[in-house]
Amino acid sequence: MKELSHAIFEKIKLEDIKKIYSGRCGCACGCRGIYREGKKGKRIFNNMKQFVKGKIIKHFDGSDEWIICCDDEEQNRTYTIYIPIENKINK
């Protein structure tokens, strides 16, 4: 995983997101948190925008998705955004 700049993260819009996850660290299958798709993830996305301030944001390209995540083991919280690869923001 590579580090993502906060400037690029700030360019992401809710409309770009396929799904978003919020939960406890350790697993992202849904057993420790929740997934929301599209505009139903607005509240999670807004929470994530506050959560990432001052933290390292990581990203990588999946087979058909751009995946962005930020976690804080001390707070036992992780957020992950899944964006269709064609909506990836490079600059």
Image (cartoon, grey):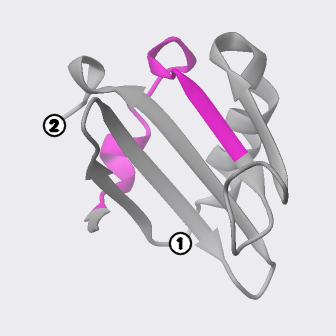
The residue range painted magenta reads 4-21
**Secondary element at image label 2:** loop
Towards the viewer: 40 or 43: 40
Using the rendered view, name the quadrant where residue 59 is placed: bottom left
Using the rendered view, name the quadrant where residue 27 is placed: bottom right
**Residue receiving disc 2:** 90
Query: Horizontal placement of 91 versus 23: left or right?
Result: left
Contact (CB < 8 A) between labels 1 and 2? no
Q: Position of residue 14 (x, y in %)?
A: 57, 19
* Amino acid type of the residue that numbered disc 2 sits on in the rendered structure: Asn
Give me the residue at 55% from left, 63% from top: 70
* Amino acid type of the residue that numbered disc 1 sits on in the rendered structure: Lys
Using the rendered view, name the quadrant where residue 72 is placed: bottom right
In the rendered image, the vertical position of residue 88 relative to residue 74, given as above or below: above
Which residue is most to the left?
A: 91
Question: Which label number is shown at residue 55?
Answer: 1
Q: Position of residue 28 (x, y in %)?
A: 67, 56
Query: Horizontal placement of 88 versus 12: left or right?
Result: left
Give me the residue at 31% from left, 58% from top: 4
In the rendered image, the vertical position of residue 19 relative to residue 1, given as above or below: above
Magenta residue check for 16: yes
Q: Position of residue 86 (x, y in %)?
A: 22, 18
C-alpha separation, residue under disc 1 versus residue under disc 2: 20 Å
**Secondary element at image label 1:** loop
Query: Horizontal placement of 33 versus 18: left or right?
Result: right
Q: Position of residue 23 (x, y in %)?
A: 79, 57
Quarter of the image for the N terminus: give it.
bottom left
In the rendered image, is residue 91 in sight? no
Mark 1 closeness class: few <14, some 14–19, many ≥20 residues within 10 Å: few
Q: Earlier in the sequence, mark 1 or mark 2?
A: 1
Mark 2 closeness class: few <14, some 14–19, many ≥20 residues within 10 Å: few
Give me the residue at 33% from left, 47% from top: 7
